[in-house]
Amino acid sequence: MASTPPSAATPRGNQPKVVWWNDRRYRAILYQVLVLGGVFLLGWYLVNNTLTNLASRDIATGLGFLEREAGFDVSESPIEYSPADTYFRVLVVGVLNTLKVSIIGIILATIIGVIAGVARLSSNWLIAKFATFYVEGLRNVPVLLQLFFWYSLITEGLPSPRQAFNPITGVFLSNRGFGIPVPDWGGTMTAMLVALAAGILAAWGIARWARRRQEQTGQIFPSFRIGLALIIGLPLLAWLIGGAPTAMDAPELKGFNFQGGATLSPEFAALLIGLVFYTGTYIAEIVRGGILAVSHGQTEAGLALGLRKSLVMRLILLPQALRVIIPPLTSQYLNLTKNSSLAVAIGYPDLVSVANTSINQTGQAIEGVAIIMLVYLTVSLSISAFMNWYNRRIELKGGR
């Protein structure tokens, strides 16, 4: 048996020592510390340089300007506001206007996108081609140009209030906006809204219970019809209990414009239409791709069981396609919310518009831009968190 040469074996106690700067672990820590230190020094230099320049020009810093009187009006506000209010309140108005167009836009864009995406897969030639024309036509035109087009169409294509279109009693279409009547029911309206919220919660609870019951027993419960009956029936019951009021607050022409009722301004209408139709094209493609990602055998199996095509789409294809649709759909919701900042181009008083006016009056651009960034970051992270939560709920749970 051959013996190991003395030079080939090194006693454990005589292992060569590695200098710390040659150890990969220590070097990794050192590099991270150096990078963090460099970032900190760069940030300190930028902040210090900015504060020095602002002080040399006698420009005030801080958020104290939020408590001062704004002194300018906005064209529309979801809450009470006057020029005598503070900058903080006018920024709140801008945030609410941004949220209003974003939430309504997300809902409408989703509806239009799903319809267009399904329509592109239709066996009807005319429907499929019309959906293709819509998708390929609008998504290749910049959204800002579309906003200009819709705004010009409303303000230049519609008549003045005195010659406004009156297609339905109480409804007026003019270049000053769209006026519609609203119920003037006082406390009954509040009770109906509470009943509507209760109906939606009850319908959601019944749907969850019916889904668990079906998984355990295989029996189908008509949760959709019962939920729809609750959503419609509870507000109707509240209306009847409240005395079944029928008074309406309809818009009336007074002077050069309409007063009363509810008015959809040209700026809001153009912004909403442009964002909805533009984002709807991308959602349509996402929906179409999600449906095509489901094996065609699923469709054949559903048809072989005697299900109608509409039921195959609603009960088999779309639930499975959701797992593919949700991640890119989140990006489109975020894009719609951020694209709402283009409202400043057509005069809609969103956050960017009122913040720009505040910056011009106070000169505190850094604070104003920081507020805009913080609001959009918060809204975007909230949308992402909700969509990620929903995506985890519908994903396939694999065994471990």
Image (spheres, rainbow, N blue to C red):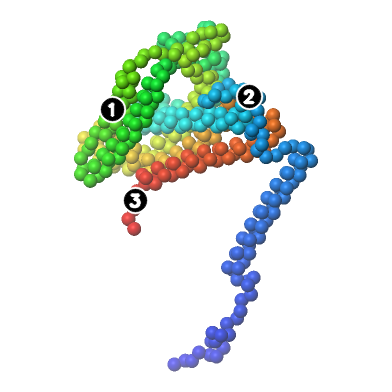
Marks 1 and 3, the one that precedes in the sequence: 1
Badge 1 amino acid:
Ala
173 versus 140 height, above or below: above
Which residue position is annotated with label 1?
229
Which residue is painted at 33% across and 40% down in the image?
319
Q: Is residue 213 above or below residue 308?
A: below
Residue pointed to by mark 2: 84
Q: Is label 3 in a helix, a strand or a loop?
A: loop
Q: Amino acid at mark 2?
A: Ala
In the rendering, at what x and y percent does residue 249 appear?
Answer: 44, 14
Q: Picture coordinates of residue 77 (x, y %)?
A: 54, 24
Q: Secondary structure at mark 2?
A: loop
Q: Tag 1, which secondary structure? A: helix
For the N terminus, which image quadrant? bottom left
The answer to which of 282 and 111 lies nearer the viewer is: 111
What residue sits right under mark 3 in the picture?
397
Q: Residue at x 34, y 48 (%)?
A: 396
Mark 1–mark 3 Cα distance, whole angstroms, equals: 33 Å
User: To which quarter of the image does residue 184 belong?
Assistant: top left
